[in-house]
Image (cartoon, coloured by chain):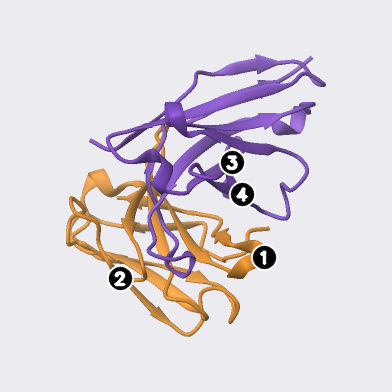
Amino acid sequence: QSALTQPPSASGSPGQSVTISCTGTSSDVGAYNSVSWYQQRPGKAPKVVIYEVNERPSGVPDRFSGSKSGNTASLTVSGLQAEDEADYYCSSYAGSTNFVVFGGGTKLTVL
Amino acid sequence: EVQLVQSGAEVKKPGESLKISCEGSGYSFFGYWIGWVRQMPGKGLEWMGIIYPDDSRTIYSPSFQGQVTLSADKSISTAYLQWSSLKASDSAMYYCARFRGATFRQTWFDPWGQGTLVTVSS
């Protein structure tokens, strides 16, 4: 069982928006502005799309956005495109003992 | 271009030892922590530990402490993940990734290596 809880699947049609949640605790997501999101396409390595809750690395489309409220973080993908179909993982700093925890991943399907 | 290149796929028998590598280029390798992440077949990401190549400081996940060893050789910009006695349950894809946060409280990883597939079977 993963430390952070994500829905196993999400879907949307091209052009629509979809939001993926990531629920942790007051010891990880709720304690630090350290939530990051990773996109993993089939057979590929993960790639960061959001870091520090809502920061976007250069090269990542502004269709990707992040937010956090309490112990739950969210990734929103607006204007869905076929290329967004992938697995998405959230991650958070969890203190000096556990350090980093991941969510179980959400498979995003573009219908 | 900042890049991490991992060693190739390995097929081993239970009880054998193994050391896989992750070579960095395009940046000052010694100055950034390198993390390791396991992904078992069809499963999610699991953080294993991180190492600071400049002085080989390490932080292990409690789940992997004592099961694996992280090391680094800053002279050749390479980090390593090793096992002394493999088990079938170690079969997985292993990724290295560069730590990017200004502090641990801002942890994120970028870029990631391409992954090394380890298969342990008798």
**Residue A75 appears in the picture as rendered:** yes
Kindly identify the amino acid type of the residue bearing the numbered disc 2. Asn
Q: CA distance from mark 3 to mark 1?
A: 18 Å
- Residue A8: x percent and y percent? 52, 57
Disc on the earlier residue, 3 or 4: 3
Mark 3 packing: few (<14 Cα in 10 Å), some, or many (20+)? Answer: many
Both labels 3 and 1 in a single chain: no
**Chain shaded purple:** B
Mark 4 packing: few (<14 Cα in 10 Å), some, or many (20+)? Answer: some
Vertical relation: B57 (above or below) A63: above
Mark 3 lies on a secondary structure that is strand
Residue A98 as seen in the image, left or right of residue B65: left
Question: Where is mark 4, residue-wise?
Answer: B58
Question: Where is mark 2, residue-wise?
Answer: A54
Q: Residue at x 57, y 65 (%)?
A: A4
Kindly identify the amino acid type of the residue bearing the numbered disc 1. Thr
Q: CA distance from mark 4 to mark 1?
A: 12 Å
Asked if the residues shown at circle 3 and circle 2 are in contact, with their CB atoms under 8 angstroms apart, the answer is no
Front-most of A6 and B110? B110
Q: Nearer the viewer, mark 4 or mark 1?
A: 4
Both labels 4 and 1 in a single chain: no
Q: CA distance from mark 3 to mark 4?
A: 17 Å
The hue of chain A in the figure is orange
Q: CA distance from mark 3 to mark 2?
A: 25 Å
Q: Nearer the viewer, mark 3 or mark 4?
A: 4
The chain ID associated with circle 3 is B
Kindly identify the amino acid type of the residue bearing the numbered disc 4. Thr
Question: Where is mark 1, residue-wise?
Answer: A97
Disc on the earlier residue, 2 or 1: 2
